[in-house]
Image (spheres, rainbow, N blue to C red):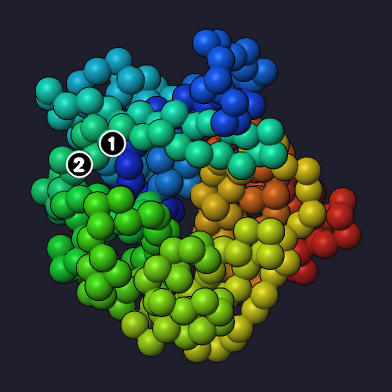
Amino acid sequence: MKSFDVLCITLINLNLLAKPVDRSLFDRDATQAEEYSVVVGGDGTNQAVTLSQLGWRTGVCGSIGDDHFGQLALQMLSERGVDTSAVTCKPGQQTAVCFVMIGPDGERNFLVKRGVCDAFHLGDIPPDLFLRTRVLNIGSLFTFRQLYGKPLAGLLRQAQEHGVLTSADAMYDTYQLGPKSMDDVLPCLDYFFPSYGEAKYLTGECDAERMADALLAHGVKTVVIKLGADGCLLKNAQCCLRQPAFPVPVVDTTGAGDSFIAGFLHGVCSGWDEARCIQMASAAAAINIGAIGATGAIRSAGQVLDWLRQRGCPLSGI
């Protein structure tokens, strides 16, 4: 039996969230925050935490600095049931920190110090790691300065050769690696979850279905494009599906995409078809944006399924 259902190679950072923050902040000496929170974060980290809440065995692989923030991040992950045995602590480095400024409309902006993330490389990943999980998830493409292209592709290809499913999110190309830096990686992904903006950057297309076609042509097996308020588009060789977003009040959009991916991978690990996977994913994202923070709203798979039933959208056969 494998140690993990889903293992995430990811940035691990401490998130400091405050709401509400708008541009007038800089016109005053001090501003009173109505809400604040300190939580562990990072794309794959959020996904691992939410998947743990949904009932799966999860772990993270990444780096922290030898500082208080790093130890706090490990403590928070352990408290949420996420295995941290593949996390390395790098002496003399700072743990990544993200200040999350949430506007009155729930939209957020980040102020990030990447710290130890810049030093994370292939050698920090245990060589047998992919043998210990059912799904190997990268959170996210463009996260790591030293892990992309052929080294990352080689890791993913090895995982696939041993029967492991591979998946990845994407993020803004902070290091300006360029779209072609992922040409070797895309064919090694069973599932890819870019946002509209990320898919546009990678493909140069403006239409979601054409973006999906371009990514499929690059070798991705299943493309799921997150379209925000317009829901999502899933496409592979067998089907093309759209799932509308659930209309809900927005408190904080931080981690909505991560909850979406966690909901989708919950379906994958459960053996569901694509239609149920994207419905579960959309419900998880909708629940997430109803509370402050990336991982505080979802408590169990039963909660998400009940939420769907209450809205007249029960998952068939579940």
Q: How many marks?
A: 2
Alpha carbons under labels 1 and 2: distance apart: 6 Å
Name the residue at 56% across, 39% down: 108
For numbered disc 1, what is the local secondary structure? loop
In the image, residue 271 sits, relative to residue 290, either above or below, namely below
Relative to 12, 121 lies left or right: left
Q: Which label is found at residue 114?
A: 1
Instruction: Answer with the quarter of the image where residue 135 lies.
Output: bottom left
- Image coordinates for residue 49, horizontal then vertical, percent: 49, 39
- Image coordinates for residue 27, horizontal then vertical, percent: 55, 20
Q: Amino acid at mark 1?
A: Arg
- Image coordinates for residue 121, horizontal then vertical, percent: 15, 48
Q: Amino acid at mark 2?
A: Asp
Quadrant of the image containing the N terminus? bottom left
Does the rendering let one see residue 6?
yes
Instruction: Answer with the quarter of the image where residue 12 lies.
Output: top left
Q: Residues within 10 Å of mark 1 (few under 14, many from 20)?
A: some
**Residue picked out by circle 2:** 118
Relative to 64, 197 lies left or right: right
Asked whether the beta carbons under mark 1 and mark 2 sit within 8 Å of each other, the answer is yes
